[in-house]
Amino acid sequence: MPDLQLKGGEVDGLTLHYVVEGRGPAVVLVHGLGGFAESWRRTIAALAGRATVFAVDLPGHGASTKPRACYRLPFFARALHAFLDGVGVPRASLVGHSLGGAVAVTYALTHPARVERLALLAALVPGFPFQSSLGYRLIATPVLGEVLAHCACAPVLRSAIARCFHTPDPTEVDFLVRFAYATRMGADARAAWLATVRDIRADFVAHRGDYRRALATLDLPMLLVHGRQDRAVPPRHCAEVAEAMRSAEVRWLDQCGHFPQLEHADVVNGWLGAFLAGRPAPR
């Protein structure tokens, strides 16, 4: 799969790994914390018949460069902007999962003319209250976080991922653990993951009001998809977003945890296809 070296500003020289399939209007899939492009394989296959589908490894994730950086949402959004410029995509619909939803929202707020539609799956949306789990709060603690990150191994990762599912599928869990394991669990990857957990706190806490005010100006089609049994991003978070963003289309899934695109792939891909079908035809 291809890699792209970014140009310009803070992200100049960084290399992003990505997957691309299909032909038609551009759709960009943005993974969550600890995720990677290939985790979207079911969504890519479902949408590639009607769109050019890009799935990208964010900086610090997957096979992309893992720099020593401040991993806040604007940093990820700038990388996404440079990526779109690099692959020659002037406008795209964004599909974000979990933290990837926050990245997609940030990009839409900073570059509204570049975004056609926004689909958020089990997404964290900056500007709305969110209480991270005790585990993440411990990891954010200096020194203790480094110790815990160093102890991470395949069984620990497998247990953490399985807890995100309502009914864990061993095949899916195994794929999310084993794919490019050495690259995703190296020292630089652990450091980037830890930095992300710590740095994004500023966006969700200190800058919550700024995001909330900016979201009131966001005027584009939006789809929210959330599992009622999501323990990573509680359903009440999505409900508060839906209440504030009255024009958003909201779809709830029963017996679904934090991975709706995997736990209910056919249903979610159908919703995404219908939602994205409202886009202008390719020219």
Image: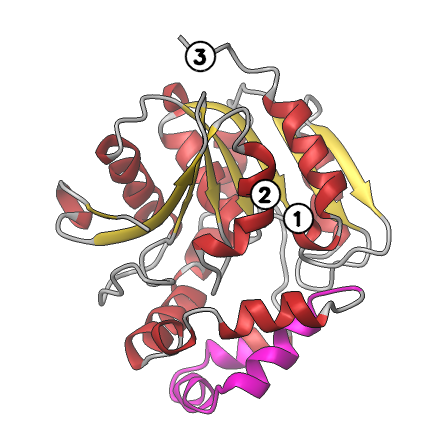
Residue 48 part of the magenta segment = no
In the picture, measured across the screen, residue 145 lies left or right of residue 68, that is right
Give percent across and percent down for residue 241: 67, 38
Callouts 1 and 2 close, C-beta under 8 Å: yes
**Which of the two labelled residues, at mark 2 and mark 3, occupies the earlier sequence position?**
2
**Which of the two labelled residues, at mark 1 and mark 2, occupies the earlier sequence position?**
2
Label 3 residue SS: loop
Graded by Cα atoms within 10 Å as few (under 14), some (14 to 19) or many (20 or more), the crowding at tag 2 reads many
Label 2 residue SS: helix
Q: Amino acid at mark 2?
A: Thr
Q: Nearer the viewer, residue 40 or 230?
A: 40
In the picture, measured across the screen, residue 127 lies left or right of residue 73, that is right
Span highlighted in magenta in the image: 137-166
Residue at 60% of width from left, 73% of height from top?
174
**Which of the two labelled residues, at mark 1 and mark 3, occupies the earlier sequence position?**
1
Residue 140 part of the magenta segment = yes
Q: Is residue 175 above or below residue 37?
A: below
Query: What's the CA distance linking mark 2 and mark 3?
Result: 20 Å
The residue where tag 3 is placed is 282
Query: What's the CA distance linking mark 1 and mark 3?
Result: 25 Å
Give percent across and percent down for residue 97: 57, 49
